[in-house]
Image: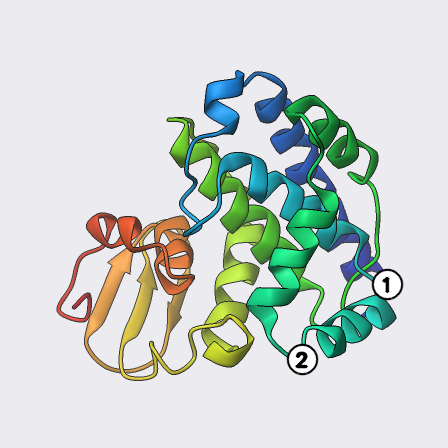
Amino acid sequence: MKSDAKRGIWRMVHAERAALVDVLAGLDAGQWATPSLCAGWTVHDVAAHLVDTALTTRIGFVAGLVRARFDFDLQNARGVELRRGATPAETLERLRRVVSRTTTPPASLDTRLVEEVVHGEDIRRAVGLARSYPREALVRALRLQVRTPASFGGAREAVASVRLTATDADLSIGEGPEVAGPALSLLLAVSGRRVALDELDGPGVG
C-alpha cells in the first residue's frame, strides 16, 4: 500500500479513537458497566480491548496468539484483562494515550477501521448514542469484512450467496438475493451484530 494511502487510513483511525475518547469521557459509572453489543463484554471491556489492539505489534500479536494456543477469543480476553484499569477513568486515560499510535498486527491496515467503527458502535449503541462515520471508512471496513474468513473474524462464508447493497454509498458486493441498507448497518450485520438486521431490507436478509 502506498504511503499516502496508509497515512489516510491512519488519519481515519486516529479520528475514530479521538471521537470515542470524547464519548467515553461523558459516560457515568453505570454506563461504563452497561453490556455492550459485543457479546459478554461491557462498555468498559470494549474500551480496554481497544487499548490492547492499539498497542498490538506484529511480533506481539503472534507471540500472544501462540501463548493462547491459537485461540483468538482467549487472546482477546487476556488483552482485556491486561489493559482494563481499576476504574473507568484509568482505562480512559490509557485509551487517550494510544489515540495516535500506528502499530498493528500482521493484517490489512483496514482491520484498524473495522476495530474502531464496529467496537465504537458496540459502545455507542449500548448507551443510546450515534455517530456519522466517514463514508470511506465504512466502505473500506465493509469490503474487508466480506472477504475475510470467519476464522479470522470476517464474514466471507456467511455472505457468499447474497448481494450486499449500501443505500448510502456507491457499493454493491456479491451475487444472489439482495441485502440492502446503510453501509454502517451492513458492516455491523456482517460483524455479527444481529441488532443491525432490523435496519436491512431484501430477500437475502434471512
Total number of numbered labels? Answer: 2
CB within 8 Å, label 2 to label 1:
no
Estimate how packed mark 2 is, as few (under 14), some (14 to 19) or many (20 or more) residues with alpha carbons within 10 Å: few
What kind of element bears circle 2? Answer: loop
Question: Of marks 2 and 1, which one's residue comes earlier in the chain?
Answer: 1
| Residue 139 visible (yes or no) | yes
Residue 171: assigned label? none
| Residue 106 visible (yes or no) | no
Which amino acid type is marked by label 1?
Ser
Left or right: where does residue 61 sit relative to residue 69?
right
Relative to residue 95, is residue 170 depicted above or below? Answer: below
User: Where does the image place residue 173, in percent across and percent down from the top left?
Assistant: 39, 73
Which amino acid type is marked by label 2?
Arg
What kind of element bears circle 1? Answer: helix
Residue marked by disc 2: 69
Q: CA distance from mark 2 to mark 1?
A: 34 Å
Left or right: where does residue 177 sit relative to residue 100?
left
Left or right: where does residue 69 sit relative to residue 103?
left
Residue at x-position 38% and y-position 61%: 192
User: Where does the image place residue 51, in percent across and percent down from the top left?
Assistant: 72, 44
Residue at x-position 19% and y-position 65%: 205
User: Where does the image place residue 92, in percent across and percent down from the top left?
Assistant: 70, 28
Residue at x-position 62% and y-position 60%: 76
User: Where does the image place residue 168, in percent across and percent down from the top left?
Assistant: 37, 49
Relative to residue 26, is residue 143 depicted above or below? Answer: below
Residue 3: assigned label? 1
Relative to residue 5, is residue 22 depicted above or below? Answer: above
